[in-house]
Image (tube, helix red, strand yellow):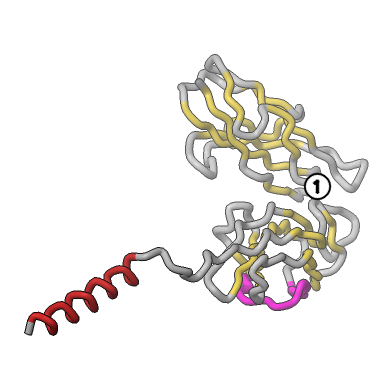
């Protein structure tokens, strides 16, 4: 009987060593790299509504098959998606979109073992309207304060740049500013200067965006930028 008990004890001990030992378990899965957007390029003016999207392939260091997620929206927060491709296996796709509209697009890659890359940078582009007499103005470009920068004091001077494909168009600007993202409070209407000085602000994070309008009632809604007030 003692011999049997010893055999059982040795077997249990062996199982414990096997189960608690490090062993050669499966290696951690590597995420695929972030896709690099190529077409349409940022701020591109598309003359047609059948838009071709292209990107550089992602690399998976484990050799796993890679699929792509493509999101197209009319806002840079992607709350209003007009297309959402979940499992693309090629590096190009054609989408039919509305004319005379500003669009934003981004991508990420995923493998077949639940590994996902981060989203790519966001590109914006425009589809031309049917009337060729006027084009949408380009969305505003940030000058200052720098994205996510910290400023001291209770006031800030916001600066941006904006252009229009039609050289003779006259541009005006609406500025939205607030502590929520996206900002909903319009602090400037039909401004003619590419700058705005804020009123007194409390400490915290502020979000702002610029809507660029031309004299033909065409408008482009800009991206949301932010800065921190100490």
The image quarter in which residue 53 lies: bottom right
Judged from this view, the residue extending furthest toward the front is 3
The image quarter in which residue 197 lies: top right
Q: Which residue is mark 1?
A: 137
In the image shown, does 68 or 4 lie closer to the viewer? 4
Judged from this view, the residue extending furthest toward the top is 153
The image quarter in which residue 225 lies: top right
Judged from this view, the residue extending furthest toward the right is 167
Q: Residue at x 78, y 64 (%)?
A: 56
Please state the horizontal and vertical placement of residue 72, each as a whole percent of the image: 66, 64
Question: Does 101 appear above or below 173?
Answer: below
Residue 2 falls within the magenta-colored stretch: no
Q: Residues within 10 Å of mark 1 (few under 14, many from 20)?
A: many
Question: Does 22 appear above or below 44?
Answer: below
Judged from this view, the residue extending furthest toward the left is 1
In the image shown, does 217 or 117 lie closer to the viewer? 117
Tell me the quarter of the image containing the N terminus.
bottom left
Per the rendered image, the range of residues in magenta is: 82-96
Q: Main secondary structure of the magenta part?
A: strand
In the image shown, does 150 or 189 lie closer to the viewer? 150
For this view, does 170 lie left or right of residue 78?
Answer: right
Residue 88 falls within the magenta-colored stretch: yes
Please state the horizontal and vertical placement of residue 216, each as a whole percent of the image: 80, 48
Please state the horizontal and vertical placement of residue 19, each as a whole percent of the image: 32, 70
Q: Residue at x 71, y 36 (%)?
A: 173
Q: Residue at x 67, y 67 (%)?
A: 60
For this view, does 152 lie left or right of residue 57?
Answer: left
In the image shown, does 22 or 114 lie closer to the viewer? 22
For this view, does 129 lie left or right of residue 190?
Answer: right
């Amino acid at each position: 009987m003692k011999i049997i008990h010893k055999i059982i004890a040795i077997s249990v001990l062996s199982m414990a060593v096997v189960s608690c030992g490090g062993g050669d378990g499966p290696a951690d899965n590597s995420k695929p790299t972030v896709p690099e957007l190529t077409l349409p390029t940022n701020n591109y003016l598309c003359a047609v509504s059948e838009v071709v999207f292209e990107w550089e392939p992602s690399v998976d260091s484990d050799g796993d098959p890679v699929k792509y997620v493509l999101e197209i929206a009319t806002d840079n927060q992607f709350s209003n998606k007009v297309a959402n491709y979940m499992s693309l296996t090629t590096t190009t796709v054609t989408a039919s979109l509305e004319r005379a509209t500003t669009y934003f697009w981004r991508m990420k890659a995923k493998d077949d073992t639940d590994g996902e890359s981060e989203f790519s940078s966001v590109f914006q582009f425009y589809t031309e309207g049917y009337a060729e007499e006027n084009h949408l103005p380009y969305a505003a470009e940030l000058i200052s304060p720098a994205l996510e920068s910290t400023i001291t004091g209770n006031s800030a001077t916001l600066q941006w740049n904006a252009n229009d494909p039609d050289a003779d168009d006259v541009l005006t600007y609406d500025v939205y500013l607030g502590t929520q993202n996206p900002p909903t409070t319009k602090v400037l209407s039909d401004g003619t200067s590419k700058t705005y000085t804020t009123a007194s602000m409390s400490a915290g994070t502020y979000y702002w965006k610029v809507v660029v309008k031309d004299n033909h009632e065409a408008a482009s809604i800009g991206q949301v930028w932010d800065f921190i007030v100490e």
